[in-house]
Image: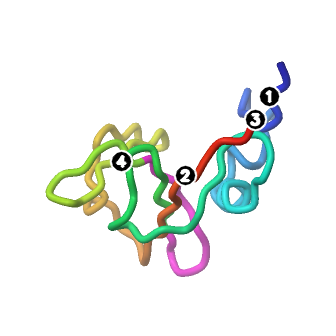
Amino acid sequence: MCIRDSYNSINDRAAAWSSVEYFRKFLLSNTGFGPMASPASISHLELGDFIQLFNGLEYYHTLIVTGFEHGIPLVCAHTDDSLMRSLNSYYYNSAAGLHITGVGA
């Protein structure tokens, strides 16, 4: 089995899984193997979709939607070891949603 985009270590990693910008570009342009996404407003996201935080200059953090509380996404992330954390608890200029539309084989 060939895994083309993965993270094994700091010296053995694919850019799409270790960089917010590359991950975004991969999901939005992928037409082959793996997940693909389209831009979506935060209010239209579903479980398993992604939220990327923007600081005014660049997207700097990716969160995965794992629940909702009163319409606010709850997210998980590894950088801060966050589990079911409210999106409202983050500080950011803006946020962009990525809705998973399918998975290519």
Q: Kindly identify the residue that appears in the image at 80 percent across and 28 percent down.
A: 3
Residue numbers of the magenta segment: 54-64
Q: Which mark is residue 105?
A: 3
Q: Position of residue 44 (x, y in %)?
A: 37, 64
Q: What's the distance in space between the residues labelled 1 and 4, CA to CA?
A: 26 Å
Q: What's the distance in space between the residues labelled 3 and 2, CA to CA?
A: 15 Å
User: Residue 89 vs residue 18: left or right?
Assistant: left
Identify the image's colour scheme: rainbow, by chain, secondary structure or one colour. rainbow
* Nearest to the observer: residue 51 or residue 57: 51
Q: What's the distance in space between the residues labelled 4 and 2, CA to CA?
A: 15 Å
Mark 3 near mark 2, Cβ–Cβ under 8 Å? Answer: no
Q: Which quadrant: the C terminus?
A: top right
Q: What's the distance in space between the residues labelled 4 and 3, CA to CA?
A: 27 Å
Residue pointed to by mark 4: 75
Label whose residue precedes the other's in the sequence (3 or 2): 2
User: Residue 47 vs residue 38: left or right?
Assistant: left
User: Residue 45 vs residue 31: left or right?
Assistant: left
* Front of the two marks 2 and 1: 2
Instruction: Sort mark 3 into few (<14), some (14-19) or many (20+) by Cα contacts within 10 Å.
Output: few
Q: Which mark is residue 3?
A: 1
* Front of the two marks 4 and 2: 2
Q: What's the distance in space between the residues labelled 1 and 3, CA to CA?
A: 11 Å
Quadrant of residue 91 in the image? bottom left
* Front of the two marks 1 and 3: 3
Q: Which mark is residue 53?
A: none
Mark 2 near mark 1, Cβ–Cβ under 8 Å? Answer: no
Residue type (three-letter) at the residue carrying disc 3: Ala
Residue pointed to by mark 2: 100
Q: Kindly identify the residue that appears in the image at 59 percent across and 63 percent down.
A: 38
